[in-house]
Amino acid sequence: MGKPLAAKLKRPRILRLLLAQFVVVCAVTGLGAYTGGLAVAVSALLGGGVALLPNAYFAWRAFRYQGAQHTRNIIKSFYRAEAGKFGLTVVLFTLVFVIVPPSNPAFFFGAYVATLFVHWLGPWLLQRPSHT
Amino acid sequence: MEAQILGMTAIAVSLLIGLGALGTAIGFGILGGKFLEGAARQPEMIPMLQVKMFIVAGLLDAVSMIGVGIALFFTFANPFVG
């Protein structure tokens, strides 16, 4: 009953935000490859990946429910999404530091912070197209 | 000396992760409450409120996530220990 109605609602353009984050990861990785070679590029790629994956999970989970009849489910889903994002971030950071320690922490955290701060562009990237 | 540095680092890491999680939790509690309030007042605005909540949530947890990253960096690759 709820699903067909939710499918009728226009989905927000979350993919644009994730795509913008992916572009930033690629840009910082390219900058790292240009300035410091492969090892620095891998550090930047790992930093960007650690930011991008939990954010993609958060976006997928947060918009599972839509519509006025799912208000409580929206809130529950948001809280679960945030908890999952927090846990996933901790796990990914731990995995990176244990398995592939970044050779250049500055580029690692630089890529991480740059990818996170793409959210500042959210109001612009997620605006709905006007039909006027 | 090294044991003291490790001990202080452990306290710093706990504070970074714990206070980051606490701040995010308080922020999300307020955000969720305001969303429910707005949804009850104007149900037709729910899709827009949901997108706004997503944007604010991303900004809200950015700083605490950076804190978590730095805390885990200190845990696994402490730069203060030679």
Image (cartoon, coloured by chain):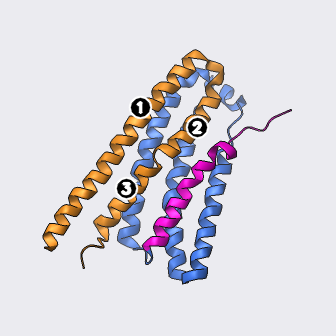
User: Badge 1 is on which residue?
Assistant: B29
Above or below, B27 against A117 in this view is above
- Rendered location of residue A80, percent (x, y): 44, 38
Q: Is residue B71 left or right of residue A49?
A: left
- Rendered location of residue A112, percent (x, y): 50, 62
From the viewer's side, name the closer residue of A3 and A97. Answer: A97
User: Badge 2 is on which residue?
Assistant: A63
Mark drawn on residue A33: none
Mark drawn on residue B68: 3
Nearer the observer, disc 2 or disc 1? 1
Which residue is found at the position 44% from the left and 51% from the top? Answer: B63
Secondary structure mostly seen in the magenta stretch: helix
Residue type at mark 3: give it.
Answer: Val
Q: Are marks 2 and 1 on the same chain?
A: no
Residue type at mark 1: give it.
Answer: Gly
Q: Is residue B81 magenta?
A: no
- Tell me where the magenta segment starts and ends, as one range: A105-132
Circle 2 packing at 10 Å, graded few (<14), some (14-19), many (20+), is some
- Residue farthest right in this picture: A132
